[in-house]
Image: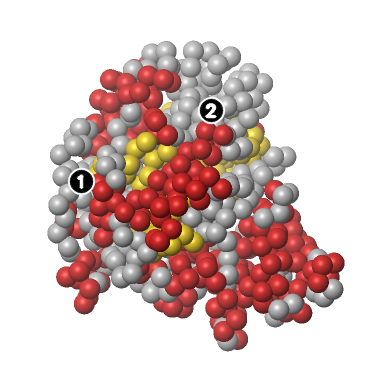
Amino acid sequence: MANHNRTYDIVIVGSGAGGGTVAQELSPLCRRGMRIAVLEKGPRLRDEEFTGRELEMAGALYEDGGGFLTADGAMTIAFGCAYGGSTVVYTGTSMLPPERVIDKWSVPGLTHADLDCRARKFMTENNAHFVEDGLINENNKLFVEGCRKLNYDVQQFPVNIKGCRGSSLCNLGCPNQAKQGTDRVQLPRAERNGVEVVTRCQVLTVGEKTLAVRVAAKPAGAKGDASPWEPGDYQIDAKIIVLCAGAVNTPALLLRSGMGRSLPRLGYGFTSHPAFIIVGEHTRPITNFVGHPKSYYLDLAESDHFVLETCMYFPFITAKSLAGFGAPHSAFMRAFPRLQMILVLACDEADGHNRIAIDKAGRPVVHYRFQAKAVVGLMCGAFTAAEILFAAGAARVHMPVARNTTIEAADAARLPEIAAAAEFQPGKTPVSAAHPQGGCGMGSGPTDSVTDSYGRVHGLPWLFVADASLFPNSLEINPYVTIMALADRVAQRIREEVPALL
Amino acid sequence: MPLDPESAIFRAVVSTIVPEAAALDGQGWHDLHRVIEALLRERPESLKRQLRIFLAAIQWLPVIRYGRPFTRLRPDARARVLAHLQNDRIQKVRVGFWGLRTIVLAGYYGRPQAAQAIGYAASPRGWDACGARAPACRVETRLDTSGFHGEP
């Protein structure tokens, strides 16, 4: 039972790439007297609270501390839960929407040219650029060297940083406020224009132009400010509601609001980028935990269903990502200053099984089964990464899918033979997914989708979605710029229809 | 408490997964346990119950094959028992071991002392914290970045 009531013209649920963008793009309406609020489940941290300490920051910034599990427990999915959403914990890699993927989506009314134009606007706004050569660490340079020796078309990531000191701690929230996520760019601008942001505020259900929400008290000793609202249950009336809680939480919110009956595709079409790391050990220390961690990539998504990206993780995540245990595992951990890391991201496809559901308590449940295509992508990606590591001079490589997880350089020529005997085993092979997508896919009507190409939920003119759940299939690259471009479309449609909707 | 830090089975499992843990002193075990406890605090009671059951199974399953419980096995036999669980043909068993292993690794490598011991020294000051290593940090690169067609 709500003990507080609030009324707004527009309520935005979530403050990540989607919510932050919608908030900024609608914020000029505040000057016309409209009341807009952003409701964010996570906390808002002060600058000095970004310490870079692994478990402390993971607990403060990620859903379930970064350990959100699929229903069968075989994969974790990492996504942010804070003011700024996942833009607080990404590496700032800024990729334009790929034309072949957007064309393949075949969403009526959605063109690549339109998305590309909007995406470029946010690339500029967020200062996306190439890291200057002198600041690139050896972990990245060795990747380039290995790729070039093997004639792979390695490419540099544009990243949205400003004043980067090279802490390498991007995935724990930048301690130097260098990443230009929505927490640094779009949300502050929206707030300056009059948008209200309410943190520690979880939306329980959405009804006809109304939301039931719960504001949590700040736990003792937790990071972040207390919510600007008093803890308790609220009923919020809003003429327009925009859901941007991400590909796991937006479908779950609609499902627990009882919308599954009228929207049979709700929750379906969930995809992600299942990923693991391949680690090479060099004979000398290299610069790895200093410098921007993710500067280069090799995109073989179209031909081989995987993308390789440079990366550098922290002690626990690295330990968790290496397969096995005991002496061989410890040997790689003890070699940390000599480690080169490559992230293998597989591309899966929306199918009839993988979906978001809810449990009896209304919490999200991700039913996820590794598709053959994604497994092939992971396996091919793993051995391609091993080739690159050896070409870059690694003395040995940790291969999570090989029978013997340590491969010495002397055995590099045997990689095809080792690959033939390799085995991917869910529950044994340490896989974590990034970039959850889908669940509220765009399309032409309720039989094939949840929303139209402007994110409007079919049959509910006052309800919009503006996050990665809109993707009707995998984007196959790092998604935040595409999410912003889609959110920009949604905001434009709302601005155009404000007179009719309010 | 799902995983009693004082119990022999807990310490035997941790030391098999991370051999260096065998050298931890009382404070080290205390710190390791505090990390695990914090990690599990917000987790559902069912998960903690599953962990307790899994740990008990690890202790007593070896009786069938080796005639003695896990804690009375030699280190190589302990490793074989855990490897068997890790490679089990039943996915739920593999997932159970993966979960236990993850918590153990968090407890061990989540401690600042472990990070220091493996030479991990990332700093919010980044390149400025390189100190003596700074010249090596700033090796020139010959990369050609002209290929990015999407540059704003």
Chain-order first, disc 2 or disc 1: 1
Residue found 62% across the figure and 63% down from its top: B101
Residue at disc 1, secondary structure: loop
Residue at disc 2, secondary structure: loop
Q: Position of residue A409 (x, y in %)?
A: 39, 61
Task: Report the number of numbered marks.
Answer: 2
Q: Name the quadrant of the N terminus of chain A.
A: top right
Mark 1 is on which residue type? Phe
Picture quadrant where residue A448 is located: top right
Q: Position of residue A404 (x, y in %)?
A: 55, 59
The disc numbered 2 marks a residue on which chain?
A: A
Residue found 63% across the figure and 50% down from its top: A427
Note whether A122 is above or below B142 in the view shown.
Answer: above
Left or right: where A224 falls relative to B147: right
Viewer-closest of B150 and B92: B92
Picture quadrant where residue A24 is located: top left
Residue A192 visible to the viewer: no
The residue wearing badge 2 is A350
Q: Position of residue A358 (x, y in %)?
A: 66, 37
